[in-house]
Image: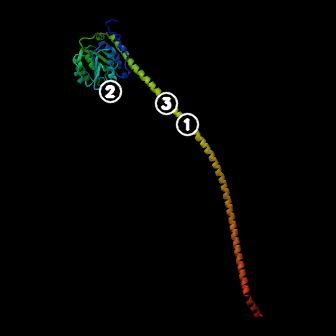
Amino acid sequence: MNQKEFNPLNFSLCFAPYDPRFFSSAWIEHVPFAFALTQMLRPRTFVELGTYAGASYCAFCEAVRQLSLETRCFAVDTWCGDEHAGYYQEEVYQQLRAYHDPRYGAFSQLMRQTFDQAVEKFDNATIDLLHIDGLHTYDAVLHDFQTWLPKMSSAGVVLFHDTSERIADFGVWKCWQELRNQYPGFDFIHGHGLGVLFVGSKMPVAIEMLLATPTQTQQNIRQFYSSLGRRFTQDQSLANCRKDVEDQRSHIQAQRAIIEDQQQYIEAQKVNLEDQQQYIEAQKVNLEDQQQYIEAQKVNLEDQHRYATELTRKIEELSAKAENLQQQHQLEMNSLRESYELSRSWRLTKPLRALSARLSR
């Protein structure tokens, strides 16, 4: 290989690992190039317009930290969101601060303001590396570029994210095409696209070699950084798979615990059912005994009924006999009374009858 050709292996920081907390970002596949670009430029000042959760910004900060550069880094954002990134809560900013401040706070600053407000805080020709990743409409991107262009140094490089996106009203691609007609640049297709635009007058050697790379070699370079970037995406997919596996294991363990509880419950219910069956059997025996007792009582009742019926019949017969005897007794009494009366009247009339007999002689 010609020594003046760009060789990505000369910038080995591209192989460095990165914090997996940022792997879900759309920018993550450009981290290897961000590391390499920082190593190429060794910028004095880096500014990012549109930071959100910090995936890209912290990548540049991490490169500065690992290279022990004297770079000053500035992240400019309102941390309220926009129509493309979406609107989000305060916790996004607070989480970024909690991660950023202890690691990069010595050389980096989070500037919570609009891009137009922040631009006044920088002197002209002082920014070596600018990353534009705010609202992605054509007008917004062009406005940000034109507003911040005077702040770029003689070695200035401007990055544009989402140069491959043409959905809805995304206009980065259009702005990028127009600017490429005015300035030398290099673009990556992967990771939604990343444009690298040189806007200074004194091009760093590494950037000059990159931009002078033959077309076929450019494809190799794109493929090289794309492959490294996909490593993060694949690591994220692997981490997600592992998490899914752990979640599934936890779910299976939870289900096993539930099943064991259910089995214990079923066993307890089985014992309870056996006790109930035994109770039912005992109740069944008791019921049969009661039925037998009822049958015996029924037979006894029938016997008593027959006895009562027979006794009633005998009582009726005796009552009839008693009534007959009473009638006979009454008749006898009447007869005796009559006899007595007759006898009495006979005695009373004896003198009269004697007188009558004498007179009849």
In this rendered view, identify the residue nearer to me: 182 or 284. 284
Three-letter code for the amino acid on which mark 3 is drawn: Gln
Q: Residue at x 62, y 46 (%)?
A: 286
Of labels 1 and 3, the one closer to you: 1
Asked whether the viewer can see residue 295, the reply is yes
In this rendered view, identify the residue nearer to me: 358 or 73. 73
**Disc 1 target residue:** 268
Q: Earlier in the sequence, mark 1 or mark 3?
A: 3
Q: Quadrant of residue 86?
A: top left
In this rendered view, identify the residue nearer to me: 304 or 222. 304
**Disc 2 target residue:** 94
Question: In the rendered image of this protein, does residue 86 appear above or below residue 347?
Answer: above
Three-letter code for the amino acid on which mark 2 is drawn: Gln
Three-letter code for the amino acid on which mark 1 is drawn: Ala
Q: Earlier in the sequence, mark 1 or mark 2?
A: 2
Contact? badges 1 and 3 (CB < 8 Å):
no
Q: Residues within 10 Å of mark 1 (few under 14, many from 20)?
A: few
Asked whether the viewer can see residue 82, the reply is no
Question: In the rendered image of this protein, does residue 266 appear above or below residue 70?
Answer: below
Query: Residue 172: x percent and y percent?
Result: 28, 21
Query: Residue 112: x percent and y percent?
Result: 27, 25
Q: Residues within 10 Å of mark 3 (few under 14, many from 20)?
A: few
- Label 2 element class: helix
Q: Quadrant of residue 347?
A: bottom right
- The outermost residue toward the top is 2
Q: Residues within 10 Å of mark 2 (few under 14, many from 20)?
A: few
- Label 1 element class: helix
Q: Residue at x 42, y 23 (%)?
A: 240
**Going by the image, does 334 lie left or right of 282?**
right
**Disc 3 target residue:** 255
Question: In the rendered image of this protein, does residue 123 appear above or below residue 356?
Answer: above
